[in-house]
Amino acid sequence: MQKSLLLGVEAIAQGAIDGGMSGVYAYPGTPSTEITEYIQHSKQAQQLNIHRDWAANEKTAMESALGMSYAGKRSMVCMKHVGLNVAADCFMNAAITGANGGMLIVVADDPSMHSSQNEQDSRVYGKFAMMPILEPSNQQEAYDMARFGFELSEACEIPVLMRITTRLAHSRAGVTRAAEVVAQNDMKLPEDKVQFVLLPGIARKRYKLLLNNQAKFETASEESPYNSYNEGTDKSMGIIACGLGYNYLMENYPNGECPYPVVKVSQYPIPRTMIQKITSECDKVMVLEEGYPVVEEMLKGYLEKEAVIGRLDGTLSRDGELTPEMVGRALGFDVEEGAEVPSLVSARPPALCVGCSHIDVYTALNEVVAEYGAGRVFADIGCYTLGALPPFNAINSCVDMGASITMAKGAADAGLIPSVAVIGDSTFTHSGMTGLLDAINEKTPITVIISDNESISMTGGQHSSAKGKLESICEGLGVEPEHLHVLTAVPKKRDDLKDLLRKEFEYQGVSVIIPRRVCVQKNVRDQKIKKAAIAKAAAKA
Amino acid sequence: MKTDMVIAGVGGQGILSIAAALGSAALENDLYMKQAETHGMSQRGGDVQSFMRISDKPIYSDLIPKGGADIILSVEPMEALRYLPYLKQGGYVVTNSTPFVNIPDYPEMEKLEKTIKDLPNYVLIDADKIAEETTGSKRAFNFVMLGAASPFIDVPFEYLEAGIRKIFERKGEEVIEINIKALHAGRKFAEENK
Ligand SMILES: Cc1ncc(C[n+]2csc(CCOP(=O)(O)OP(=O)(O)O)c2C)c(N)n1
Ligand code: SF4
C-alpha cells in the first residue's frame, strides 16, 4: 500500500480516525496541537462526523472525552505535558472510574523545553495513576498504537496514556495505513451504573480493582507487539531502550546490529520478565529514556543494589533530550564533535510580529508603570510573553496559564499596589476567569489587561473560546461597568490606553481593560481561507 | 544511497516547502526518509531548521548526529553557519547570499561572506536574484536553493522534479513550471560555481 508522509502527531490523528474514534477533545499546546488540527482538516473525519472542536482547556477536554467513553464510544484527548497538570484531577480519577468505550489520552512532552516552561515527563503521571502507557518510537508505531490504544483501553477497561515527545511529534516519515477502518462503537452505557460515581464506598472498590488489575496490565506489556527482547552476544552490558531511546541506540550501529542484549520498551508497565532476564544475564544495564530517569530510578532502587547506568550517574545528561551523539558517547564510541559555531553568528530569538497588537499594549503599559516603579506586571502565557524580551522588558512573571491574575492578586494582598495582570483572551477563558472571580469577591485592587487578539496565536491561530464573549464574562463575574473598558489596540490610541491605565491604577478595586485587535498572522490566514472559499465557489458556479 | 541534510532559515521564509518536495521525492521512489522540523512559535523571525534524512536503508534517529550532515542548505547566510557543528568533514554548505536582517547585531556582510568563503566546500548563491531573473519573481527562491544543493544530494535529479510536481499538483501547471525552472537555474549555478 502507498505510504503517506506524516508527522508523528498526524500519524496519531490518522490512526485514531482509522481506529474507530468518535471524538477528539483538546486545547492547543506545542507539540500536540497538530493532532487535533489534522482531524479538523480531515475529510474522512468530517464524513464520519467525528467531534473535533477545541475545548476551553485541558480539563474540560479530558472530562468530555471521559463522558464520551462513558457512553461507550472511543474518544481521544490531546494536550501538551503541562496541560496534564491542568487535567490532572480528572486524569487521576479516570484511572479509578475506568473506561467504557476506549479512551486514549495523548500527552506530548517537550524535553529540552523547545517551547515550554518545564520538561516534566508524563510517564511519571502514568505511573502515578497506575495506567498503561504507550510510547511510540517512530511514526509507524504512532499510527498503529493509536488504533491499538483503543483496543487496549477496552480490554483493560481503563483509559490509556500515550506519551510522545517533540522529536517524534514534529518529525515526518512514511506511514503505511491499515487496510481497514474500524467502525465507530454504538452507544452503550456501562453495565455497572455506579462505576463512575466516585463516592468513597464505590471508589474504594474501584481502587482495589485498579490495584488488582496491575498484573493484567503487566501481562499486556509482556505480550505487547511493541516490547521486545533482542538477544546480543556481548553480555558485559544490557540496554533498556525506551521510546525514542531505541532510535538513538540503533543510530550508532549503522549495520543494524547492536552487540548487547536490548529490551525495547514502548509499552508500560515495564515488561517484568524481560527486565529480569536482562538484569540477570548482563553485568550491568544502561537505560536510555527520553525525559526523566523513570525506569532507571525504578531499577536502580534507593539502595542502588543493581548495576544500572544512565541519566542518574552522569553516563547521560540528567536533563534535556537525548541525541544520537550523547548516546554514542555513553556507548563508548569516539563521537564527532563537529565544527564550532563561528563567533559572528548572533542569536535570533522569536519576536512579536511587526504590527502586533501586544506591542501597542506594552508600549503604553511601560510608560505608565515607569511612573509607579517597575516590578509589578504579572503576565501569562502566549505571544505576549515575548514582552519579557527587549525592547520591552515589560513583564515580571510567566508561570502557568491563568497565574497572571491570581499572582497579581496575591501581590496586591501583600501590599504591591497597583498590581497589574496581562493575560491573553484564550488564556483568560482557559484559566483566568476563576481567579478574576476571587479578586472581585475580595475587591482586590488589581488592574487586569486582557490583551485580546481574538485568537490563540502562540500555537498557530486557533479559534479562541473567548471570541465575542469577554465583556459579558467580565460583567457576569461582577466587574463594575465603570471599571470595564474596551478599546482598539492601535498606535493612535496609545494615549487613550495610558490615560485609562493611570485612572484605573488609582482605583482600589478590580479594573479590567480590554485592548482589542485581531492578530496580524491570524488575519492573513483568515483572509487566505476566505479567498480560497470564494474562488472555490466561483469555480463551482 | 544516503543523504543527511540540515535545512536552515528564518521563520516565515518557507524552508518547509523544500523539505516537502524532497520528502515526496523520497516517498514516491520507495526510499526511507525522516524529516524533523521546528514548530511552535507562530511569530515570524526566529531561527528555524529542519533535519532531512533520506536513505535506501531504514533510518532510526529523527535527529542528524553532530558532524553527520552531508549538506547544510540555508536560505539565509548567517543561518548557514549556525549549523556548522552538524556538518561532516567534506560536507557542503549551500547558502543563499541574501541576508534576512531582523536583529540589531546582525554581523557585517563582508565578514559573513569571508567566513563562508573560508569554508572548504561551499556554494554561495544569490537565490533571490536568480529566482527573479529566471522566473520573474523572488518567490521561487527556495527551489533555486534546492537546485543549488542538488548536485550533492544522493537522489536522482528527476526525483526532485517529480517532488516539486507532486507538492504543487493542485496549484496548476504554471506554478509547477516556475518552480522547476528555479530548480534548474539553481543547479546550473552550483555546477558552475562549486
Ligand atoms: C496548560 C497549558 N496549555 C497550553 C499551553 C500552550 N500555550 C501557550 S500560549 C497558548 C495560547 C495563548 O493564547 P492567548 O492567551 O490568546 O495569547 P496569544 O498567543 O494569542 O497572544 C497556549 C495554548 C500551555 N503553555 N499551558
Ligand atoms: S502571531 Fe499574532 S499575536 Fe503573535 S506576535 Fe504575531 S501578530 Fe502578535
Image (cartoon, coloured by chain):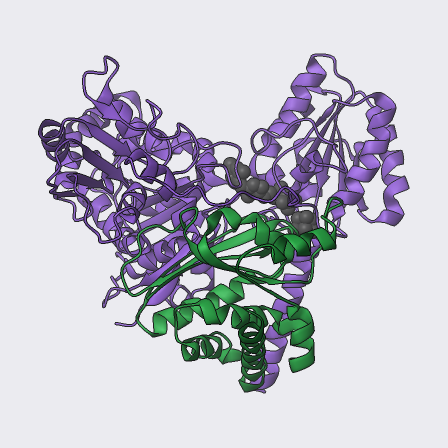
Chain colours: A purple, B green
Residue at left offset 68%, top offset 23%: A408
Q: Is A4 displayed left or right of B11 in the figure?
A: left
| Res. A451 image quadrant | top right
Residue at left offset 32%, top offset 68%: B31
Q: Quadrant of the C terminus of chain A?
A: bottom right
Residue B83: x and y, percent? 53, 49
Residue A167: x and y, percent? 41, 47
Q: Is residue A392 above or below residue A143?
A: above
Q: Is A484 displayed left or right of A54 in the figure?
A: right
Residue B105: x and y, percent? 74, 44
Q: Nearer the viewer, residue B55 or A471?
A: B55
Residue at left offset 18%, top offset 32%: A237
Q: Quadrant of the N terminus of chain A?
A: bottom left
Q: Nearer the viewer, residue A481 or A395?
A: A395
Q: Is residue B112 visible?
A: yes
Residue A504: x and y, percent? 83, 28
Q: Is residue B85 above or below residue B30?
A: above
Q: Is residue B136 visible?
A: no
Q: Is A249 displayed left or right of A318 in the figure?
A: left
Residue at left offset 30%, top offset 71%: B30
